[in-house]
Amino acid sequence: MTTVERYHDISMGHRVVGHESKCRHLHGHNYRIHFSCSAAQLDELGRVIDFGVIKELLCMWLEEHWDHKMMIYEEDPLLPSLQELVPEDLVVVPFNPTAEAMAHYLVET
């Protein structure tokens, strides 16, 4: 089995509803998302996958849907106000946007 990895960086805001400290406020981070791809055999060119495919399918999805947006939990009490102010800037998700929940969403969805 051969495994290759590529990463992609994005910047995004969020807020963790119910957090006991400063993460309960609207704030942002730089995120690095790692993609690992494995194959039992390499293709005819000696690759697991063309990195251009990863860029086109995964990195560009992140750029379009998450980069420079504000991720908000669908049950966040601030959501209605934010939807009135900046609806095009929001990514509304069915989970409280912790790093762990975001990673789980990317893997499972």
Image (cartoon, rainbow, N blue to C red):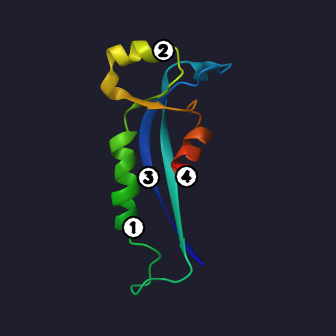
Mark 2 crowd level (few <14, some 14–19, many ≥20, 10 Å Cα): some
- Left or right of 85: which side holds 79? right
Tags 4 and 2 in contact by the CB under 8 Å rule?
no
Dot 4: what SS?
A: helix
Q: CA distance from mark 2 to mark 3?
A: 29 Å
Q: Amino acid at mark 3?
A: His
* 3 or 4: tag closer to the N-terminus: 3
> What's the CA distance linking mark 3 and mark 4?
15 Å
Pointer 3 residue: 8
Callout in the foreground (4, 1): 4
Residue 107's disc is 4
Determine the secondary structure under disc 1: helix
Numbered label attached to residue 78: 2
In the image, which is nearer the foreground, mark 1 or mark 2? Answer: 2
Screen quadrant of the N terminus: bottom right
Q: Is residue 73 left or right of residue 82?
A: right
Q: Residue at the location (68% across, 19% down)?
A: 20
Residue placed under numbered mark 1 in the picture: 51
> What residue is rendered at 59% in x and 34% in y?
98
Indicate the position of residue 62 as horizontal and vertical percent values: 39, 46
Amino acid bearing label 2? Leu
**In-front residue for pair 37/68:** 37
